[in-house]
Image: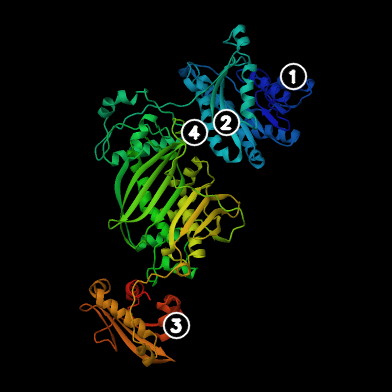
Amino acid sequence: MAASLRFDGRVVLVTGAGGGLGRAYSLAFAERGASVVVNDLGGDFKGEGKSSSAADKVVEEIRKKGGKAVANYESVEAGEKIVKAALDAFGRIDIVINNAGILRDRSFVRISDQDWDIIHRVHLRGSFQVTRAAWDHMKQQNFGRIIMTSSAAGIYGNFGQANYSAAKLGLVGLSNTLAIEGRKYNIHCNAIAPIAGSRLTQTVMTQDMVDALKPDYVAPLVLWLCHESCMENGGLFEVGAGWIGKLHWERSLGAIVRRKNQPMTPEAVKANWKKICDFDNATKPQTAEESTGSVLEVLSKIEDGGGISMNPTSQAASVATSELGRAVGYKISPWTFEYSKLETIIYALAVGASVKNPDDMKFVYEGNANFSCLPTFGVLPAQKSLLTGLLTEIPGVHINMGKLLHGEQYLEVYKPFPSSGKFSSEGVIVDVLDKGSGSVILLDVTTYHEKEPICYNQFSLFVVGSGGFGGKRASEKVKPSVPIPNRPPDAVCHDVTSLNQAALYRLNGDWNPLHIDPDFAALGGFDRPILHGLCSFGFSARHILRQFADNDPARFKAIKVRFAKPVYPGQTLQTEMWKNGNRIHFQTKVKETGNVVISNAYVDLVPSSDETSANGPIKLIFHIQFPVHLYQAEGLQSNLVFDVIGQRIKEIGKELVKKVSAVFQWNITKDGNTAAIWTIDLKNGSGEVYQGPARVPTQATFTLSDEDFVNIFAGRLNPQQAFFNGRIKVKGNLILAQKLDVILKTYSKL
């Protein structure tokens, strides 16, 4: 036999507890170990009169049975006093049953201002006052259970009860919102619409009906909803005579009755009225987000010039087994993504790169000789399919974007990204999985640069509430996650996110208000706007790139992550890393809470040149033999470099002239004196390199030592740091100097 539900140590406040439902609740809670505050003003069903006897009798009943209870005679409009009575008597408040109520039934035209106001003061305002007084105490103890008492009149309406039904439906709205705001504090709020005999029904029910509709047949539902093991939250239940039913809203699919750049007319409404009112394929929205999301999708359809038939978007996704074949293998319409150096810099800043770290200058300053694009930038062109509504065109899978969660992400980079360019992407649904509580859509996206594949992404998208359609739970097409090793991490990196981090990351194109609007975030149950998962993803990848790959994007091959929990801007991201050959396992935590926010993750790196040489010969880009006497005769190592540059210019000079279009002079010093002068002409003819001063006007002149020159080209000296340290002197157009990168790095690697 199942263990009985107990309330030992819990304190329950029941309003309107002198009789009927309130008395039944009080006795039932006390019998199961709760301490009960029995509140009742002691008036009649119209709210007139006052007496302590009703509450005292119930308290006496409880105490005779060995229970603990105190009486309170305040009006529910004095909510703070009632809650104080609970705190004074028992030291805490765990459960609030808002049960008090009165009637002032009149047909609508006969309702006076007084009749309207007193009903709302007792039912709606009274429940508000009592609950508000208890709320902070529940938050501090991280537990609370609240019941709002609605009625069938509030749900369906009832003749002669306009004032009563308005207040009772208002309680449903109050309950729904408290369920959302209280969720993170383990405060649950539910509404009931009971049918039972009480002071409010004594004039309309026969004795036989009163006996059949005992309050004892309602109390068990209330006790269950208030037990610590019950996770129900935000529900609405009708209950009476031993029957319980849960209610939800239902909505027709509706119809879009306007088109882009055309006026909306009542004639269009009339023409679509049958469709607007057709409930054959009705949907059941569960949240305000779903309702708003549907309207946003309508706007998207109108802007895209779509048809006027609205998809069933208020369900998270409706996936029928018979439709899966149409969804799997479906190719999304191709899309393009164009960016400049500005976008690469914004992305780097958005994922935490900073001028405070000299190694990050290559990602945030376009004038840096090693200016590069972070490899995780590759998610941006791919995710455009999610941000522009392309997923809504998938046949058989109708997605409510408000219920779409980013579960996992895989990115593989085939070659480093240029600092600016135009990409094209193609996406395909490779599988749809049934996870019971939802479905998982596997979206593969391949991105191309000038028709050559440059990266590949796999998005694992979890659609809440769309499971249970009988599909498979696993797929061989999933890029698998990998658990972290069972040992302390080899390295740990920290980065404090800025309070503006999410606002900054939005500039990459993900404009979801969840990441900036506090009110919108509250609808999702969050304290405040949260950080994008792909922002934390970028932070972690940067840490690994810096720790294990010398901050070299060319070493980055692939990354796989599972998003576990949200991050709030301002929190500290802590990446814990384990090296296993060229695979770096990692997990990311919020340092302040210890919560793991990215789990089962890894980065695969390309072996470094040192690792390659240990396992086999290094593959040279080119090889040129130099006469030994050249170096020995002049005693300058830089001669070697200029000869290599000259050789390359002879091969591809026209291409370099087209890209650079500038003349550079180099003054090479030794022991503080000028030892050689070289000119690189990448502006005239096919370009050339020669020893001696420039024969044409130069755009920039560099002066540095022979040793520093060679160290720069060997990668042992950062040119930007050398410039700031005074080891390189520059005259002329400094910005043009960055164009040298195309020959000094790409075309003359030693």
- For marks 4 and 3, give the one nearer the viewer: 4
Q: Position of residue 556 (x, y in %)?
A: 43, 61
Q: Which residue is mark 1?
A: 57
Judging from the image, what secondary structure is the residue with disc 3 in? loop
Is the residue marked by circle 3 packed among few (<14), some (14-19), or many (20+) residues within 10 Å? few
- For marks 1 and 2, give the one nearer the viewer: 2
Name the residue located 59 percent from the left edge and 26 percent from the top edge: 122
What is the C-alpha distance between the residues marked 2 and 4?
Answer: 18 Å
Whether residue 516 is visible, yes or no, is no
Is the residue marked by circle 2 packed among few (<14), some (14-19), or many (20+) residues within 10 Å? some
User: Which quadrant of the figure contains the N terminus?
Assistant: top right
Q: Which residue is mark 4?
A: 436
Residue contact between numbered discs 3 and 2, judged by CB atoms under 8 Å: no
Left/right placement of residue 485 relative to residue 685 reads: right
Residue farthest toward the left in the current orientation of the protein: 685
Residue type at tag 1? Lys
| Badge number at residue 232 | 2
- Whichever of callouts 1 and 2 sits on the residue coming sooner in the sequence is 1
